Image (cartoon, rainbow, N blue to C red):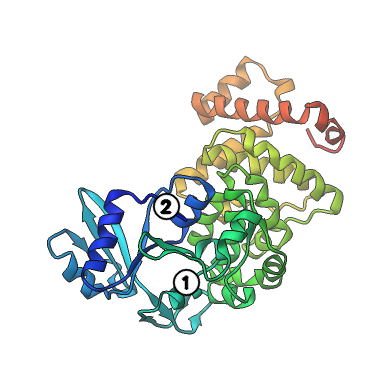
Amino acid sequence: MKINLPKKVEFIINKIYENGYEAFIVGGCVRDYILGLEPNDYDITTSATPNEILEIFKDYKTIEIGIKHGTVSVMIDNELYEITTYRLESEYEGNRRPKSVEFTSNIYHDLKRRDFTINAMAYNDKVGLIDKFDGVNDVKRKVIKTVGNPDERFNEDGLRIVRAIRFSAKLGFEIEEDTLKSIYKNANIIKNISIERITDEFNKIILSKNSKKIITLYETKILKYIGMKLDLDEDEKYIFEKELDILSECDKNLEERLVMLEYLIINRSEKELRYEEGKGIINLLRYSKKTTDNCNKLIENMFLDENNIDKIKIKERLRKIGYSNLIKVLKLKRIYYNYILKDDNCKLKEKIKY
């Protein structure tokens, strides 16, 4: 297998080799090449220690912010590249981080600590592809599978539970059976993870092409463990899952997709008052006050009755939420009704609260 590396990445790897150490691109950039995608960035891993990297690149601007965890950033022609030493990690604390980090000269040990097989591959032109955990086949099979025992991986870092769903949504892959069973089993670990980290992963899910994978967050009780009191029977869950397709009809805009999701959730639960006010996804996750307030304002207006609206009420709405937000509300309502009224969704209409 041959990967055409960018010249600057190739330069960094060759320079490290010239000084007697190994270096590879690793993780998502290797996965993306196998998928035929252009990587957004390149993570480089090496047998050289941070201090040795500083010495190798002493003639270049370097940033040492991540040096405690083995990462040195090197500036090459105004582009920043992260170079991280192979690591061994000790026992984890609080399902979040290792107690200590040790450096190693063995890349296998570094790859072994990573989350999923599709992210545990390394490459350079000298050695070729290193794939100790069958990541290439998992890419071809389109599955998300942990490196080693899934219970161990998720107990090390509980955020990996949400990351598995995020990669499933981003890539359109299915989560491998044992990995999915472990997510169900260990979902309560998410309570130990900061809401900021969860929000970041959630945003990537809702903005992905497969944002309907949000249903997995409900099915595995992850939403419950972050505080959402939403209880759907099987029929309601089926309809809710179908409706989540609407998210991909929205623009790739965080506020608009959050508002549409909240609207769908309330529609599925309001009838029997099982949706607790203030416990929606927008208020439970960590957004800026501006984003939270604006989304809540839009949600409130999504439920106003258009059938009894007149010029006076339109002016009242404009005064409360402004012209641009009113346009957003009307656009989202149009997306919602157009989707529901599609021929293949007509069977949902009678069960949906308008």
Could you tell me which residue is drawn at 48 percent across and 60 percent down?
196
**Residue 297, located in which quarter of the rendered image?**
top right
Gap between marks 1 and 2 measured at Cα? 19 Å
In this rendering, is residue 7 above or below 305?
below
> Which is closer to the viewer, label 1 or label 2?
2
Could you tell me which residue is drawn at 38 percent across and 49 percent down?
4
Residue 3 - label: 2
Horizontal side of 166 relative to 234 (left or right) equals left
Could you tell me which residue is drawn at 76 percent across and 45 percent down?
240
Residue 286 at least partly seen: no
Locate the C terminus and report the quarter of the image it occupies. top right
Residue 151 position within the rendered picture, expressed as x and y whole percent measured from the top left: 63, 76
- Name the amino acid, label 2: Ile
- Name the amino acid, label 1: Leu
Residue 93 position within the rendered picture, expressed as x and y whole percent measured from the top left: 49, 81
Residue 162 at least partly seen: yes
Mark 1 vs mark 2: which is more N-terminal?
2
For this orientation, the residue located farthest to the top is 311
Helix, strand or loop at mark 1: helix
Could you tell me which residue is drawn at 23 percent across and 59 percent down?
74
Horizontal side of 12 relative to 191 (left or right) equals left
Residue 94 position within the rendered picture, expressed as x and y whole percent measured from the top left: 52, 78
Residue 202 - label: none
Q: Mark 1 points at which residue?
A: 111
Helix, strand or loop at mark 2: loop
Residue 155 position within the rendered picture, expressed as x and y whole percent measured from the top left: 58, 76
Q: Which of 32 and 181 is in front in this view?
A: 32
Horizontal side of 110 relative to 56 (left or right) equals right
Q: Nearer the viewer, residue 210 or 199?
A: 210
Callout 1 touching callout 2 (CB < 8 Å): no
Q: How crowded is mark 2: few (under 14 residues within 10 Å), some or many (20 or more)?
A: few
Q: Nearer the viewer, residue 46 or 80?
A: 46
